Amino acid sequence: MTEALSVRGVSHSFGATRALDDVSLTVEEGAFVALLGVNGAGKTTLFSLVTRLYDNITGEIRVFGHDLRRNPGPALAELGVVFQSRALDGDLTVAQNLSYHAALHGLPRRVARERSDAALAAVGLEPQRGKRVAALSGGQQRRAEIARALLHQPRLLLLDEPTVGLDVKSRREVVRLVRALGRDTGVGVLWATHLFDEIEDDDEVVLLHRGRVLETGRARAIAGERGLAESFLAMTGIEREMLTP
Amino acid sequence: MSLSDLGWRGRARAFRGIVWRETLRFLRQRERFFAALVRPLVWLFIFAAGFRAVLGLSITPPYVTYVLYEVYITPGLVAMIQLFNGMQSSLSMVYDRETGAMRTLLVSPFPRWFLLLSKLLAGVAVSILQVYAFLAIAWAWGIRWPASGFFTVFPALVLSGMMLGAIGLLLSSTIRQLENFAGVMNFVIFPMFFASTALYPLWRLRESSTLLHDIAAANPFTHATELIRFALYGQVNLFALGFVVGATLVFMGLAIYAYDPSKGLIGRRRR
């Protein structure tokens, strides 16, 4: 099987603070991998490195075999990204935001239109295409961001805590949507979260804590008899209160 | 394989997309357009009229006769429009970074220098729209320069716009938050504008202070103003041209360096 994402021995520091320490993980093509960790575990830093917002100071990151440092263009072309902070232009309409993204990937106008239609249909936002983003609900904005991330037909989706700030219903919808997209289109997913109920038994889980990978494996295996949350607490040694969203 | 087109056609589309977005944002913010116009017009209609009698100007190139003060300060006001626009573009870069829109731009598969240059040129396009609106009003007000100046000034506007935009871009890379920007406006825009040849010629400055004269002579804004002044009269001020091109390369190089993930300031920052 092809490796969609391969992170090997990656470390990153902010001054004296070590945000990531020798992190390695793999996302196989078409797989759903959950990157599980509490706030401050280093998930966003890892995403910033994989999307080349930060440089990988040590180690190696490859996207479908393309070394991110030596060959960033083809690597970034295969990535669709939904950042934790909202990154749509609120003044523009959904369609205009998508056109802008399509242009940033060099898509011809005709292809951009077709892809916009398909991506909006996939996330159920066709009626909102002409609306200003600022007028959409939080859940709709998230779905619009997912549509945008899918626009150039990437083979790997990165989502950094995409359900943060959403109500329970929208949260469930977004999770269901991304899982369905993974199944239907074969796009691989790296899903960063601190919420255990977003993880299913068969998911591959990478457990990140204080910048280090503590465990990698199937959720079912990590959970054992105690369940995922209890196992997580035992492995990290953190207080239960820290798990509340 | 994704659908992304990384070839030159794809790049051209990316460039068009970035310019389109900037123009769209600009058109949506009508107040910004009017503010950009009102500022130089206040200088032209009120300040210049008031100072016409006070400030005597000798004949200096490119002028061949005595000119009214309004005529003298028009190129400086054009440069001022571009200066404000350059800073405003960088303000929008800081805003984009705070809102996350900057990430959308930077995770595009095209090289970062290309994205930043496109962003810069998009800002220049917007500034040129403003300049032509101002020049049309000034012309209607009765201020005259050779009519061909409307065309000959264009390349000068592109160059000066790029230099002032590059300064803004560099500033935006070093500013952490929007709130800090007001200070930069005071410490960058006003000193640059007043310590230049926009309002008074260099020889006048020398009469009052040699130090001020030297500062103005080293001020990139002076050379942007002179480049525009000469271009408006169909002439090329070679020294100003060289200075503006050199300064653009330096500021742009520094801005790209600052936005480079491996060396720049963004990489060291935690968001």
Image (spheres, rainbow, N blue to C red):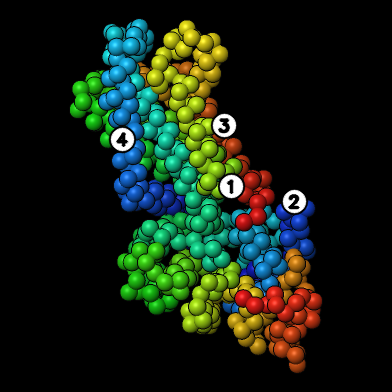
Q: Give the residue at mark 3.
A: B250
Asked if labels 3 and 1 touch by Cβ distance under 8 angstroms, the answer is no
Q: Residues within 10 Å of mark 3 (few under 14, many from 20)?
A: some
Instruction: Provide the chain ID for the residue under circle 1.
Output: B
Q: Give the residue at mark 1.
A: B176
Q: Are marks 3 and 2 on the same chain?
A: no
Residue B101 visible? The answer is yes
Instruction: Provide the chain ID for the residue under circle 3.
Output: B
Q: Quadrant of residue A114?
A: bottom left
Q: Nearer the viewer, mark 4 or mark 2?
A: 4
Asked if labels 2 and 3 touch by Cβ distance under 8 angstroms, the answer is no
Cα separation, mark 1 vs mark 4, equals: 30 Å
Q: Residues within 10 Å of mark 1 (few under 14, many from 20)?
A: some
Residue at 34% x, 71% y is A128
Left or right relative to B18: residue B218: right
Closest to the observer, A227 or A70: A227
Closest to the observer, B12 or B159: B159
Residue B10 numbered mark, or none = none
Circle 4 — which element?
A: helix
Cα separation, mark 4 vs mark 3, equals: 32 Å
In percent of width and height, residue A155 lies at 55, 70
Instruction: Provide the chain ID for the residue under circle 4.
Output: B
Q: Nearer the viewer, mark 4 or mark 3?
A: 4
Amino acid at dot 2: Gly
Residue A15 numbered mark, or none = 2
Q: Are marks 2 and 1 on the same chain?
A: no
Amino acid at dot 3: Val
Q: Examine the rendered structure and indicate whether residue B118 appears above or below residue B222.
A: below
Q: Give the residue at mark 4.
A: B38
In percent of width and height, residue B143 lies at 24, 21
